[in-house]
Amino acid sequence: MRWWLLALAALWAIWLIAKPSTRRIEAQMDKAIALATECKPREAQSELIALRGTKATAEQLQRVQKALNEASATCARKRQRDKAWREAKTSVESALGAAAVERARSRLRAFTKRWGEDDATRAMKEEIDARQPEHPRADEVEGGKMR
């Protein structure tokens, strides 16, 4: 009986060593997804390839691949926005350099209409507003004379 228990314990130990931990696979999946969301596609793809070498299920691999595809689209849009911002910023700054405040404002407005506002666009808007010459408001002017 003692030998049977010893053999059973040895088999159990071998099974624990040979079987990959589901926690380890889940951690590797999370790492691959995190790399993808950080716009590091090569590293994420390497993790996916490493996952294929483990005993990850087809569903787990499919979930990681889907996350990589979604992150790829998001990263592509982010790269496009960054490129558009560099171009718009140069255009706005050159318009401000030429003292064409309204042209700068319209270029910034066109960018924010397409890509949305962020801290950089708000800072640029404040810079444009700071360079805007003071004009009396229309409701302050009565009959061509200021009140």
Image (spheres, grey):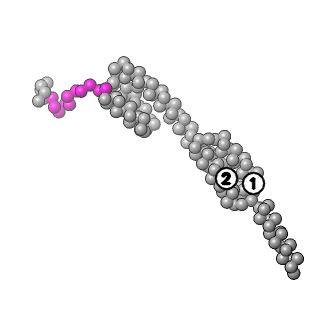
Q: Quadrant of residue 127?
A: top left
Q: Which mark is residue 80?
A: none
Q: Is residue 104 left or right of residue 28?
A: left
Q: Is residue 75 above or below residue 6?
A: above
Residue 66 visible to an observer of this rendering:
no
**Quadrant of the image containing the C terminus:** top left
Residue at the (41%, 38%) spot, across then down? 119
Q: Residues within 10 Å of mark 1 (few under 14, many from 20)?
A: few
Q: Quadrant of residue 137?
A: top left
Q: Is residue 31 above or below residue 122?
A: below
Q: Secondary structure at mark 1?
A: loop
- Residue at 37 percent across and 23 percent down: it is 96
The total of numbered circles placed on residues is: 2
Q: Position of residue 59 (x, y in %)?
A: 68, 56
Q: Residue shown at 66%/42% (left/top)?
A: 43
**What SS does tag 2 mark?**
helix
Circle 2/circle 1 CB separation < 8 Å: yes
The image's mark for residue 28 is 2
- Classify residue 16 by image quadrant: bottom right
Residue 147 belongs to the span the image colors magenta: no
Residue type, numbered disc 1: Thr
**Chain part drawn in magenta:** 131-141
Q: Nearer the viewer, residue 122 or 9?
A: 9
Q: In this image, 144 relative to 71: left or right? A: left
| Residue 99, percent from left and from top | 34, 20
Check the picture and name the quadrant holding the N terminus: bottom right
Q: Residues within 10 Å of mark 2 (few under 14, many from 20)?
A: some
121 is higher (above) or lower (below) than 47 = above
Which amino acid, mark 2? Gln
Q: Residue furthest top?
A: 98
Residue 138, position as x, y percentages in the image? 19, 30
From the image, tell me which residue sits under label 1: 54
